[in-house]
Image: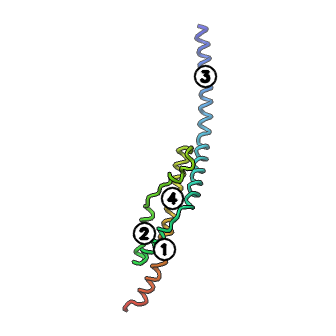
Amino acid sequence: MMKAVKFVRVLSVAVTILCATTSGLQSQAPSDTTALAQSGARDGAEAAKSVSTGGWFAGGLASGLIGPWGLLIVVPTANGSTIAPRSVRSAKPDSTWVYAEAFDRAFAKRVRQKRRTAAFTGNLIISVPVVIFAAAFSDR
């Protein structure tokens, strides 16, 4: 009978320690996850600054030849373009999946924004003079 009582006490102490350890881990995990996600998003947005958008600007210039309707072609194309952030993120191979997902999301969002802006600006540089020229020389 004494052995059973000692076993129950040892078991209850072990369960108490396990619960205390588990609750401590659970309270720390969200803050660590949030910090990793914020760090990944910040690094992803920073890495996107170095991505060139010259080709998208040139595409905007070319689409400007058909006037503002070129925006209907080039801006959605820039928005739906494929982005490969994993090649940029390879500098940190030891990163966790939380960091990697946040990095990828922020990188893709910023690159798409840069591409849309470049395509829109390129289109406006050509399409505004085209529209003005067409309006000036149109038959009334």
Residue bearing the label numbered 1: 122
Percent across and percent down for residue 10 are 61, 17
Residue bearing the label numbered 4: 109
Measuring 53% from the left and 48% from the top, which residue is drawn there? Answer: 100
Estimate the spatial distance between the alpha carbons at disc 4 and disc 1, rounded to whole Å.
20 Å
Estimate the spatial distance between the alpha carbons at disc 2 and disc 4, rounded to whole Å.
17 Å
- Circle 1 Cα neighbour tier, 10 Å, few/some/many (<14 / 14–19 / ≥20): many
Estimate the spatial distance between the alpha carbons at disc 2 and disc 1, rounded to whole Å.
10 Å
Residue bearing the label numbered 2: 74
Verify CB contact (< 8 Å) between mark 3 and mark 1. Answer: no
Mark 3 lies on a secondary structure that is helix
Query: Reading the chain from its start, which is encountered first: label 3 or label 1?
Result: 3
Q: Nearer the viewer, mark 4 or mark 1?
A: 1
Residue bearing the label numbered 3: 14
Estimate the spatial distance between the alpha carbons at disc 4 and disc 3, rounded to whole Å.
48 Å
Query: Reading the chain from its start, which is encountered first: label 2 or label 3?
Result: 3
Measuring 56% from the left and 55% from the top, which residue is drawn there? Answer: 44
Q: Nearer the viewer, mark 4 or mark 3?
A: 4
- The answer to which quarter of the image holds residue 20 is top right
- The answer to which quarter of the image holds residue 46 is bottom right
Estimate the spatial distance between the alpha carbons at disc 3 and disc 1, rounded to whole Å.
68 Å
Estimate the spatial distance between the alpha carbons at disc 2 and disc 3, rounded to whole Å.
64 Å
